Amino acid sequence: MLTKLLFNNFEMEIIIKQPLRKIQANKWQGHAAIFLCAAIFGLGVSVAQNVAAKRSAFRSVNINNTQPRRDINGEIIDAHDGCLQFFNGRYYLYGTAYGKTHGYSFNNRFRVYSSADLEHWTFDGELLKTPPDGIYYRPYVVYNPHTRKYVLWYNWFPKFFEGHVGVAVSDTPAGPFTIVKTAVNVAHAEDGIGDGSLFVDKDGAGYFIYSVLGMGPTAHAIRHSIYIERLTQDFLGASGQTSELLGTGAEAPSLFRHDDRYYALFDTTCCFCSAGSGARVYVASSPLGPYTEGPNINREPDGRPIVAAQQTFVADIPTSSGPAFVWMADRWNSRPDNIKGHDLQFWSPPLRFTTDGRIEPINNVSDWHMSILLGRKRDPIKHPYIWPKKYNNPNPLKTDPCTGAPLPPED
């Protein structure tokens, strides 16, 4: 009698010469068979675990901050103000593609690239199905363990300073994502929503950290004020449970957890600025606070940014020495060819935490190495999704909404 057992993808064959009905007729033989199976099961699990451990390969990879990242076809990666996630054994880089526009364009697209090693990237397509007209930026994707869906939250303006946050879902990390709501009713929605990003805690609860523009009809909020709000269980809406006001005059927030502390990072508005912005650090023992402000980790003693870039995310990367938290920031106007979509992005060496919970200042390095968990290899997607529509904005912006400077015609 030939029996196959499967232990965590490890298959074993067991040959039992005596028919089962004869074994059952003899109690001693029946008990022996049970003990034998239990021993084999334990051995199988042990072998399977060893096989799985061997499959968990780590390799030192180089992170370069001075050259544009490129995909396997040699094209410059155009993915800004988004996030880097490790889903289902593969790294996914989400961001806004600006192309040759000036950034305030109806033709901004959300893109995703994926990689097994943070060095070789494939273009997996655009994210949103049938998006309504507007200016899109800051896509953030998380996995919902309750619904087993990938959830995308993003910011968009039907017209400038009418800030909304939308939510979309997909069965896969690469999408495309189907829009569920174009205007999520977060606690301060009527005052206009600016930059925001997502965080999922170890218990599966989701949170949205965001800025309130303070330009709505009631104008009760201070402009560019930062709040954190817990999401509904399906991550498709806001629960109404919010933090107190964390800070003002700020944007580009990020939220993450290290050990038993929660860290909210953000700083002054930048608006595609070349000088960059800082990174104020707020620390709490629970996601909704209360938070205590600590030192700014991207400011020199004279106030200048250590790295001339604006924060977009703090990525949690699996490494040979445990989770590493990499600070990601966009270096606006750093492109060598004057194409906005080619602006560089800075990835810091892993953040360093002190015993009392502070984060040490960021190191501005041109390149560095990290031993990461190698992800799953996969053939490139043959026909990545591309939203076919190209917008011709009938009322394009003629001046920069932040600086008032003239804008070049859209390309």
Image (spheres, grey):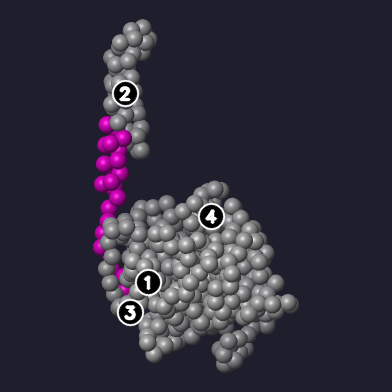
Q: CA distance from mark 2 to mark 4?
A: 40 Å
Q: Where is residue 55 drawn, in percent x and y?
A: 29, 47
Q: Which residue is mark 4?
A: 205
Q: Which residue is mark 2?
A: 37
Q: Residue 276: which quarter of the image? A: bottom left
Q: CA distance from mark 2 to mark 3?
A: 57 Å
Q: Which residue is mark 1?
A: 359
Of mark 4 and mark 3, the one earlier in the sequence is 4
Q: Nearer the viewer, residue 111 or 307?
A: 307
Of mark 1 and mark 2, the one earlier in the sequence is 2
Image quadrant holding the C terminus, namely bottom right
2 or 4: mark nearer the eye: 4
Q: Are marks 2 and 3 in contact (CB under 8 Å)?
A: no
Q: Where is residue 210 drawn, in percent x and y?
A: 57, 70
Q: Which structural element holds mark 4?
A: loop
- Where 179 sits versus 56, above or below? below
Numbered mark located on residue 364 in the image:
3
Residue at the image position 58 percent from the left and 87 percent from the top: 402
Q: Nearer the viewer, residue 263 or 40?
A: 263
